[in-house]
Each structure stands twice: as structure tokens, then as C-alpha cells.
Image: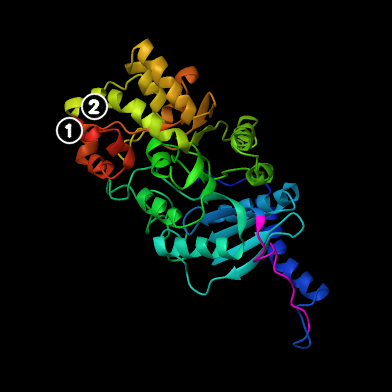
Amino acid sequence: MLVYGKKRNFAAVKRFLVHLLYICVPVLLCLTGASCRDSEDEEQIPQPGKPGKKLARTLIIYMAAENSLSSFVDYDSLEIAQGLSTVGVDHRVVVYIDDTKSSRLCVGTRDEPLQETKTYSRNICSTDSADMESVLSEIVTTYPADHYGLVLWSHASGWVPASGSKNVRRTFGVDNGLRRSTNVGPVMEMSTLAHVLSHLPHFDYVFFDACFMQCVEVAYQLRHVTDYVIGSPAEIPGYGAPYDNLLSALCQISEGDNLPNMKNVVNGYADYYDSGGGRPYRGAELSLVRTSALEALAAATAPHLQRLFADTTTPDCSEVQRFYYNPSQYTEYYDLQNLMYHHLSAEEYSDWLSAFMAAVPLSHLSSSWLSMYEDPRTGKVCHVKEPEYTGAVSVFVPSDILAQRGYVTAYHAFDWYKDCGLSSTGW
């Protein structure tokens, strides 16, 4: 996420209510229940979320917020608390928070308010692979379920590695380790994230509430650990997802294919911004990737990319939709579908599109969105030029200048690069 400003005018009220909720609920339970016991024989208060009991769904929201997004934690926590009334009785929500205050777990269900259940004795590094795996393993062990959903909430920069440029400081997340609102510190790269998630139960979906994460390279890297990837190829406001509106869809489970439910997540997110709920930040570029179809997409895409990039060629992308306008820091994040539309014959494009639509069954493209890095003379507004031929999934287009910055070498580590046979191009 990128921080654009304060969230809503009643931010102070929200913060107060969240603190009141976290502080007062355990106190009230203590006064009315049996945990404040006078003897060892008294029954201990049950922990929220029915720890140890397998439920239908455990939704994990992982907030790596020991950075400039820390101030948004209270806002989203209250939205989550409000949304609990919409989830099923056999669902639980577990929120891991690491911000400028502490590293902690909060749990809630439809019948139990969101409340803090654990504060870690040390400052967890949320972007460290061992720490992330430890936290997530603890959650799935304590709160077992038939189905798991995972929301990854933080700053992000898509597939671009931290080592790609001296200006780049993150891929997913950033943890300064100082309990401060700064964005300098360890990050997590995509191969590491995929490795961590491979040691956990399979996820129905991974939802990135973070900028730039809907690129084909990320989804492809995660294809073995989740059925779906939801995210934006562009920037998103610090507001992030409207959890009070989305929690029901994030927790629901469809028989067989979970596609209808995932569509509700994408549409609910997009409707919130398109209707002005994120005022003044209108617009949302969002898509849903079905990972089971990604290898077929790679096979369909490989010969075209090999031709376009042959002999270290950079194709003309002047008319191709891009989602970022400051390549000196990251890359342009060109839209994969639009790239194919502009560089394939009509017959080639039609054949390729069937593979793309199987892998990307839903995309939402607002006509415009706000960007921190667009030319200020344009009002920082970016536009979608050809929505009919744009899929809201980005792809890397190599160039000499990006090679000099280390991006191309870093790209070699990605499965998409390998499986598309891009080594044959010289890049």
C-alpha cells in the first residue's frame, strides 16, 4: 500500500473505539465469566475462536505494519470487528498485527468480538521467513479449519526484488524493527514467500491488500500454494480493502470451485472505490487469477514473448497500458493482455486470449485511478485507455536500462521466466 493521507474524518473516533474494544472486551469477560477465578477448580474462560476445534474456515489477515502504514491498522481493525457480524457461525477470523505498538494476535467470530489473545514477548520481524512461518504455523495449529484464506496486508512492489535497485526497498512488506513509522528495513521476496506458504495448508486464496502484487510473475510463483490470487497491478490507497463489506465474502465457501465467492471479493472492493467510499481516491484496478490455469497460460505465452524479446529486443510499448510511471524506482508494470493485443496478429491474439481468460476469469478496471508517481501536471490521475483489451495483470518487459539496474538478472530466478523459455532471448 501507499500512504496517501488520513482515512475518513472520524479517524479519531475509530481509533478510540478499536482501543475500547480491545481493552474492554477482555475486562467484561473477566467480570462476567469464570477466568477471574478464586480457586484452581474454577473453569477458565474459553478463548475466542474455539482454539483446537476444526471449523469450516479460518481467515488469516497478516498485517506487516511496522512501517509507515502503522496508523492504518486501527482503522482496518475496526472494519474487521464490524464485519464479523456477517460471517458464518463456523468461520473465524485471526488477525496478526505487527505495528509500531507490538506484535500480537487478535481473534473474533460472529458471536465473539475481535479481541487480542496474544502479545508476543519480542518484536517479530514480519518479513523474516522463519518468523512468518512460525506465526502462520501457530495460527493454523491453534485454529484448524477445512479451508484457509490469507490476506497479506502491507507495502509491496510486485515481483521486483529488494536488490533490483538502490531505490527499491521492498517486495512484500517492510519491517523496520524499531517500532517506528519508517520504510527502511527487511523485506520479503516472492520466492521466499512461496517457500514459506508451501509449508502450510493449501490456501483457497491469497488476497494482496498491497500495491502492484497482481503481476503474472507473482501469481505464477504462488501457483502451488493457493487456488486463487487477488490483487491490483497498480497502486492502492492506504485505505486498502473495506473489510466491513468484504469479510462475509472472504469467509464464505462455495461447493467445489470457489470462483463465485472470489468474484464477490473483487466486485465488493471495486464497488467501494468506484462509488466514492475511498474518497477522494476513486478507482480500482483489480483482478482474480486462477492458478490451476497458469501453466497453460505460460505455454501459450512463451512463443510470443520469445519472439518479442528475441536477441535482447525491447518491443515498442508506447501504446501499451502501464500501471506505474516512475521506472527509475520500479518498472512500468505493463499489462500482459494489452501487450499481446498490440503485438500479436488478430488470429494469434484470439487463440492466446482463451488461455488468458481461463487464468484470469475476472478483472475490474476503473476508467482512472490516482497515483503518487504520475506527472503532477496531470493531477496524478492515470487512465485505462483500452479496457476491452486490458486484463489487470502486469508483466515485466526487459530493457537495457532495467538490465543496468539489476532487474533482468533478478528476473532469472522466477519460474515464469524459466517456464516461458526467456533465457533463449538473451535477456
> In percent of the image, x 38 and y 55: which residue is there?
187
Q: Position of residue 377 (x, y in %)?
A: 42, 27
Image quadrant in which you'd find residue 323:
top left
> In percent of the image, x 65 and y 61: which residue is there?
107
**What residue is shown with label 1?**
426
Numbered range of the magenta stretch: 42-55
Tell me, yes or no, whether the two marked residues, 1 and 2, touch with CB atoms within 8 Å: yes
> In percent of the image, x 59 and y 43: which residue is there?
241
Asked whether residue 53 is drawn in magenta, I would say: yes
Say what amino acid the circle numbered 1 marks: Gly
Examine the rendering and report whether any part of residue 334 can be seen: no
Residue 240 appears left or right of 196: right
In which quadrant will I find the C terminus?
A: top left
Q: Position of residue 412 (x, y in %)?
A: 25, 42
> In percent of the image, x 40 and y 17: which residue is there?
351
Q: Which mark is residue 309?
A: 2
